[in-house]
């Protein structure tokens, strides 16, 4: 009977994680995914709890095996190790809950479970080359009321709410007052989200255009010389068509081709003429080679101004390991206020987005490149940065989506990059900056969760020591 119960818990959690995270998460599932593990923890030995928690998470996260191993080429051993570390972390967090539950420290158990996991996510964000990628919060991108919590706490508050829900349900029979307090926090967060969505956003709107081409000859990084020159001419023609439809700002994808110093003259001349003639801002992503140093660069053309550039800060290993990262922001002056420029993976991190928010950016222009399968999951990670920092997102990705979202995380317009030989999108975007609590106070909630994790862990260790001390 016990074996069957434990096997069922593993299967339930694995299924909930499998379909509740990954490339196309169904957001309701992650609210319940930890529940079977916690129920096992309340009535099993620590060894059984650890095994069940490990297996449930480990099997569930194999939902991204094809993407990471087959598409991105991650070695099988690295994948297993990466997923295994996550599963071990979740098992330890579950064991902490079990220890506090068995001591009848209901309130501490309620707090410790989300605090411990958020602490792991936050520390991983500080050290990982992939930033916040993989955080539970991204499973909720389609649940707009809870997504608004990011404007207060960053992604950490959303992850905490998910785990708080299961912990509250488990302790409800033993400590209803504490459980209802936890559920009350979730209810307040949802009411905040509903209210924030109902509030009017910026009335100042600007027409933006996005372009991407997934033709076979355009999918990769096009070789320098005539091939890049040909591609840029094609993009310039598509840009002209969007400008004629009234687009004030046009964003093209990243790494369209390789441009060495001597080739930038012709490229800059073509796009600068478009910008000057039609008073439009144009953002073009290329690999720029300058004195043997390579940059993943966005080149920005504004009417009557010298060409400005932004160099991508966060590189995707191993594909971009030989590129030199940038170190500074690039802000464009608009009548509605400053706009910012970032590139693809930069939006997987809370910075530089927070710095752009601090500078008052109302819109972020983001050239990008996805991998077809992850067009939804990776393409929409940037949406959370907009909610956190109070700006709209205009993101043009080849092998992905052309996406425009507002500062509430609502997708205003979207089109597949392979919808046409040169897929285009034109729409109005709210352009004024919205001040958020997270932008002002940063990772305060993650620090609070870290402090709660340390406090509850030390309390648990002290309790174990006191019980084991001879009398």
Image: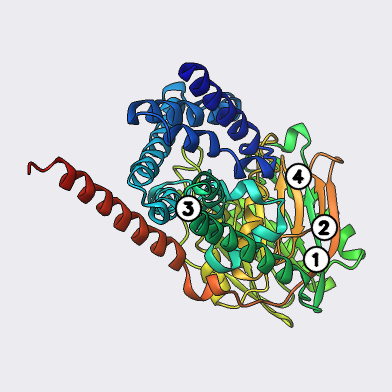
Residue bearing mark 3: 175
Classify mark 2: residues with Cα within 10 Å, few (<14), some (14-19) or many (20+): many
Q: Earlier in the sequence, mark 4 or mark 2?
A: 4
Residue 455 drawn above or below residue 335: above
Label 4 to label 1: alpha-carbon separation: 17 Å
For the C terminus, the image quarter is top left
**Regarding mark 2 in the picture, which secondary structure is present there?**
helix
**Regarding mark 3 in the picture, which secondary structure is present there?**
loop
**Dots 4 and 1: beta carbons under 8 Å?**
no
Residue bearing mark 4: 230
Q: Residue sitting at 81 percent across and 51 percent down? A: 414
Number of numbered discs visible in the structure rendering: 4
The image shows residue 403 at horizontal and vertical percentages of 76, 54
Q: Residue sitting at 55 percent across and 47 percent down? A: 169
**Dots 2 and 1: beta carbons under 8 Å?**
yes
Label 1 to label 3: alpha-carbon separation: 67 Å
Q: Earlier in the sequence, mark 3 or mark 2?
A: 3
Determine which of the numbered discs, if any, sits on residue 239 in the image. 2
């Amino acid at each position: 009977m016990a074996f069957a119960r434990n096997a069922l818990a593993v299967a339930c959690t694995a299924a909930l994680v499998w379909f509740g995270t990954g490339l196309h998460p169904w957001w309701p599932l992650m609210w319940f995914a930890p529940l079977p593990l916690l129920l096992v923890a309340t009535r099993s030995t620590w060894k059984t709890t650890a095994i069940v928690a490990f297996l449930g998470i480990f099997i569930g996260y194999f939902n991204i095996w094809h993407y990471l191993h087959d598409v991105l080429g991650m070695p099988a051993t690295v994948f297993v190790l990466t997923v295994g570390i996550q599963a071990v972390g979740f098992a330890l967090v579950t064991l902490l809950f079990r220890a506090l539950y068995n001591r009848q420290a209901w309130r501490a158990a309620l707090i410790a479970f989300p605090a411990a996991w958020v602490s792991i996510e936050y520390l991983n964000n500080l050290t990982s080359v992939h930033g916040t990628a993989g955080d539970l919060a991204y499973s909720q991108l389609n649940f707009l009321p809870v997504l608004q919590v990011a404007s207060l706490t960053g992604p950490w508050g959303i992850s905490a709410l998910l785990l708080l829900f299961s912990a509250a349900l488990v302790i409800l029979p033993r400590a209803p007052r504490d459980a209802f307090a936890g559920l009350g926090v979730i209810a307040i967060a949802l009411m905040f989200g509903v209210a924030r969505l109902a509030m009017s956003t910026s009335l100042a709107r600007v027409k933006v255009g996005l372009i991407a081409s997934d033709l076979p000859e355009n999918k990769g990084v096009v070789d320098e010389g005539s091939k890049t020159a040909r591609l840029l001419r094609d993009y310039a023609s598509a840009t002209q068509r969007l400008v004629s439809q009234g687009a004030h700002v046009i964003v093209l994808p990243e790494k369209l081709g390789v441009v060495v110093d001597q080739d930038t003259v012709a490229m800059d001349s073509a796009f600068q003429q478009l910008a000057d003639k039609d008073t439009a801002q144009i953002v073009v992503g290329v690999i720029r080679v300058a004195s043997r140093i390579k940059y993943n660069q966005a080149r920005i053309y504004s009417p009557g101004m010298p060409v400005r550039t932004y160099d991508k800060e966060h590189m995707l290993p191993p594909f971009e390991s030989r590129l030199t990262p940038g170190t500074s922001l690039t802000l464009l002056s608009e009548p509605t206020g400053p706009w910012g420029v970032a590139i693809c993976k930069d939006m997987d991190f809370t910075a530089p987005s927070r710095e752009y928010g601090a500078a008052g950016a109302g819109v972020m222009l983001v050239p990008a490149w996805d991998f077809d399968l992850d067009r939804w999951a990776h393409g929409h990670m940037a949406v959370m940065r907009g909610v956190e920092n109070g700006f709209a997102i205009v993101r043009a990705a080849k092998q992905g989506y052309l996406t425009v979202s507002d500062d509430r995380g609502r997708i205003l317009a979207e089109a597949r990059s392979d919808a046409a030989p040169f897929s285009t999108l034109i729409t109005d975007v709210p352009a004024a900056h919205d001040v958020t609590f997270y932008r002002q106070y940063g990772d305060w909630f993650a620090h609070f969760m870290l402090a709660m994790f340390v406090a509850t862990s030390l309390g648990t260790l002290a309790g174990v020591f006191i019980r084991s001390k001879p009398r």
